[in-house]
Image (spheres, helix red, strand yellow):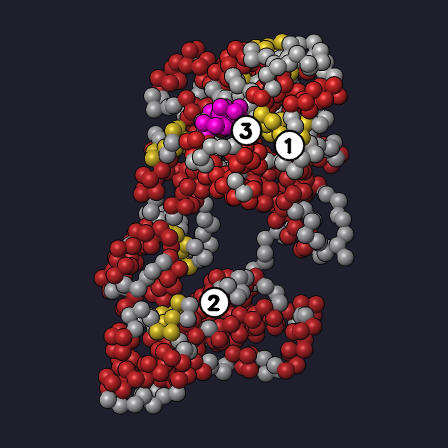
Amino acid sequence: MAIRIPWDKHEAAILLDACLAVIDNRLSRVDAISKVSRTLREKAIRKGYVIDPVYRNENGISMQLNIMMALILEIPSGLHGASKLFIDIVHLYKTNPEQFQKVLENAKKGGIVMPSNKEDFYRWLDSSVHPSDVLYIKKDCDLVDTYSKNNIKLKYSLFETNQLADIQKVINVIKKDVFFRAKNERQIQKIEKALNEYFRFMKEFLSHNKSAFTPEEKRESKTNRCGDEAIISERNINTNEKDFLDVDFEQYKKILSKDYKKGFRLNDKLSLKRFRMQWQCTFKNELQYTDEAICKHIAHITIHHGDMAYLPEDMLNENTKCRLLTYITTLFSEGKSAIYYEALYHKFADDFAIGRINNPEMLKTYLSYVNEGNMYLHKSYITSDSNVEIDNTDEVRSFLIAQEKPMRTENIIFSMPHISKDKIREVIAGANSSEFVRNKKGEYFHADIIKFTQQEIGLITEWISNSIADKKYMGGKELIDTIQTKLPSIMERYSFLTWLGLRDVLAYKLKNVFSFKGQIISAYGEDLSMSDIFANFAKTHEHFTLTQLDMLKSDLDTSIYFDSVYANSLRINKNDFVSVDQARFDIDATDIVIGQFCCDDFISIKEISLFGGFPNAYFPWNQFLLQHYVANYSKKYKLIHTGFTATKPVGAIVKRDSQINRFDDVIIRVLAESKIPLNVNDALQYLYDTGYISRRSYNSLDTVLVKANQYRKNKGE
């Protein structure tokens, strides 16, 4: 059973270090959370703890990161109070950074990196095998290590496991991998001998630590007492020389090239029957081998993708193959760390269309076949080094900074053909792309190409702070207008900069000082939205007008958020709003009067135009006040509509005990029960005239008309 383990100072130091990386823009928040979670979970496992999926998981680390960030920046976190451990580690960092670094270094030494047996094995080889064998054993074990990490059935390093069962699994997979053995046919015996030596080394290495053997391994060792020899020395039958003795592979190639350009389906009885017929027709003799042997022969000279086999020369001609490999070599020599299959596929799409490479996955299969050890194949890309860590963000960042100007997305993709276009789009416009600024639609630059002086940043920060102190926010357009008026030199230095680009640059550079949400800038951690601004405006005014809302709308370069306004004020007529506490409705009496008008399940607001019988509401009754009353106060009625508008109260007053809950349901009945022809133009005009919609448009009208027509038929009209 997993136990709950309290945080220690080393874990706190690792978390604090990640927070500093986020604050300094060296690491994204998402990556920091993932990295800390992975590090602390691995650290616990190496200490021998039994942990569950909840232990130091990303959700928990996210919350702890917020708490630690708040301590570092000395701002409220919005969460529960920080622990004494967190307070102490932050205090240590701020008052004694040298001592904090020692704690952090000790934390990072805590075995969070998988141990490798590689160096110990290499030293063991020098004293345990013949000197002439050392070099090829090292080379072949390195080859198998790369194969093991990339193989979908393994996904771990040969050198980074201390379990004999894991090593045995690598051996077993290689014994059954026809493709690997065919590809490495000339050296397969040496590979087997190299693995034989590595297994012998690990048995000696682990013999002093019996706990390293699982019960399965102990049982297995009884049946495998011959050890090294029994495990590996038997050669796989698929590549045994006797299978290929006296085989004329040129005859196989002739038929495959002539009749199987689109590939041969291995182990398919119908395909084999057809192949035998074509053989007899071509060579005038019967193919004498068994179906199994024929499949082995074909597999030996072809590339396999799925259950299909292709001749390499049919997949890609020699000239294109040379250009492809030269292009890859050139990109690596230019310093590219990785090349995506998708990018390569699109680069050579016209050439591949002539051959038999139909998608990036087939290209990957082909490259794995022609690879001579100068590239490493991963799931979606290739590298020139097995230890390369891919960072597309860093490559795109360096490229855009070097350009010193905005670039169209398609030009970025064209200039970086080794990275897939989807990866580039994810970098510049994905969830963690704030450093990549959209200057206008389809045009991006990196925020670091825009330089502000200390005085400029100081003034901008002061303007935002003053606005927040005055009204709790500053609008993005308001800020840009102020900069253009008071600091025109910025726009003069960067003539390409749009107001959108300037706003988002400031959002990136000041993200740890203020909160930027859309066009609203607020105090750090508050994240005010447009809806919040309109709600706050309504709350803080005893009386305001539609004209004032229009001015706020213009200042923020947005639309009026009427739902927020109506929720925090009372609209008493077309132009005026008052505070909510001024509402004085006799709800029961008012609902009785509405009932005198609403004899069916619903009625439009427009149908109530006589208010002489309504009880005193301290404000003159009108359709705006009626709309607001039904929306927020009525007990027996509810408002169903498409939204509040500036100039026209529309919608349906619906009985709460009816089965009507959607506006579509209202207008289906309205149209069905009307006498109008059920077409788009007549329907829109009718709904507008009867006060259900404020303009002659409705998104789902086609569907509504179909249902209204069916409703009419069911009613017999």
Q: Which residue is mark 3?
A: 642
First in sequence, mark 1 or 2: give its number.
Answer: 2
Q: Specify which label sits upstream in the sequence, 3 or 2.
A: 2
Tell me if 412 is positioned left or right of 454 in this view: left
Q: Residue at x 75, y 48 (%)?
A: 5
Q: Which residue is mark 2?
A: 144
Give the number of callouts: 3
Q: CA distance from mark 1 to mark 3?
A: 18 Å
> Quick one: quadrant of the N terminus?
bottom right
- Helix, strand or loop status at disc 2: helix
In the rendered structure, does residue 433 fall within the stretch colored magenta?
A: no
Residue 533 to residue 52: above or below: above
Q: Which amino acid, mark 3?
A: Thr
Residue 451 place in picture, x, y as percent: 42, 23
Above or below, 93 against 246 in this view is: above
Label 3 and label 2: CA atoms lie apart by: 65 Å
According to the picture, the residue beneath numbered tag 1 turns out to be 601
Magenta segment, which residues?
684-695
